[in-house]
């Protein structure tokens, strides 16, 4: 069995994780994440600037040096808890598997913004809570059309839009 065949098999397993876990991020889910950027890419494999290497379920259109966000969470597959990861890059959400290298992690909450008012300065999250985006970030958040996935940092003062990778400061309403 060649390397490409092995990558295909792993890719299929990763897609199963995605299908199993994708809908889970509907309210607030504790996750780990880290931002990085692409140092090299080859077929379905990317090496990030921090040194970690990831096998992707799908190829990415992103260029070398593009910023990425890796989000990891525990999912249940056939009754077993498994650590799954997704690479968010340039509007893509790609299931990924860690191959080698170390990476830092930060705690966050994975959720969705389901509503937006006041020119993007008032956001309603999937769990019903609301966040305020300070006026100086209004120009960024006003262009985001709900629903969309976000990471809310553990201290709840920053939010990352996983579709475009932008970060804004937030405060609870």
Image: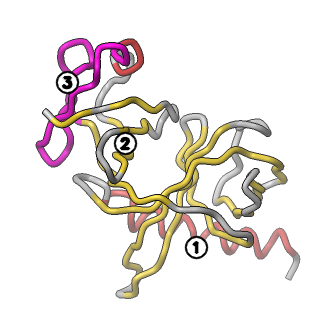
Residue 91: percent from left, percent from top: 54, 35
Label 1: few (<14), some (14–19) or many (≥20) C-alpha neighbours in 10 Å: some
91 left or right, relative to 37 = left
Q: Residue at x 37, y 48 (%)?
A: 153
Q: CA distance from mark 2 to mark 3?
A: 16 Å
Q: Name the foreground residue: 143 vs 94.
A: 143
The disc placed on residue 13 is: 1
Q: Residue at x 20, y 40 (%)?
A: 125
Q: Residue furthest right?
A: 2
Q: Name the foreground residue: 41 vs 68.
A: 68
Residue 133: percent from left, percent from top: 28, 25
Q: Name the foreground residue: 26 vs 28.
A: 28
Label 3: few (<14), some (14–19) or many (≥20) C-alpha neighbours in 10 Å: many
Which quadrant: the N terminus?
A: bottom right
What segment carries the magenta color?
A: 114-138
Q: CA distance from mark 1 to mark 2?
A: 23 Å
The disc placed on residue 122 is: 3
Query: For mark 2, what is the residue?
Result: 149
């Amino acid at each position: 069995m060649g390397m490409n065949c092995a990558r295909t098999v792993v890719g299929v397993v990763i897609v199963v994780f995605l299908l199993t876990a994708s809908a889970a991020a509907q309210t607030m889910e504790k996750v780990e994440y880290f931002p990085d950027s692409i140092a090299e890419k080859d077929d379905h494999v990317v090496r990030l600037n921090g040194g970690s290497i990831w096998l992707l379920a799908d190829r990415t259109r992103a260029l070398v040096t593009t910023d990425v966000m890796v989000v990891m969470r525990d999912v249940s597959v056939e009754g077993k808890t498994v650590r799954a990861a997704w690479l968010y890059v340039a509007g893509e959400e790609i299931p990924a598997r860690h191959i080698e290298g170390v990476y830092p992690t930060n705690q966050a909450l994975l959720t969705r913004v389901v509503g937006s008012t006041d020119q993007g300065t008032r956001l309603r999250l999937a769990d019903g809570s609301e966040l305020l985006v300070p006026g100086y970030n209004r120009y960024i958040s006003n262009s985001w059309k709900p629903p969309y996935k976000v990471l809310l940092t553990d201290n709840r003062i920053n939010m990352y839009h996983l579709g475009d990778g932008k970060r804004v400061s937030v405060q609870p309403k």
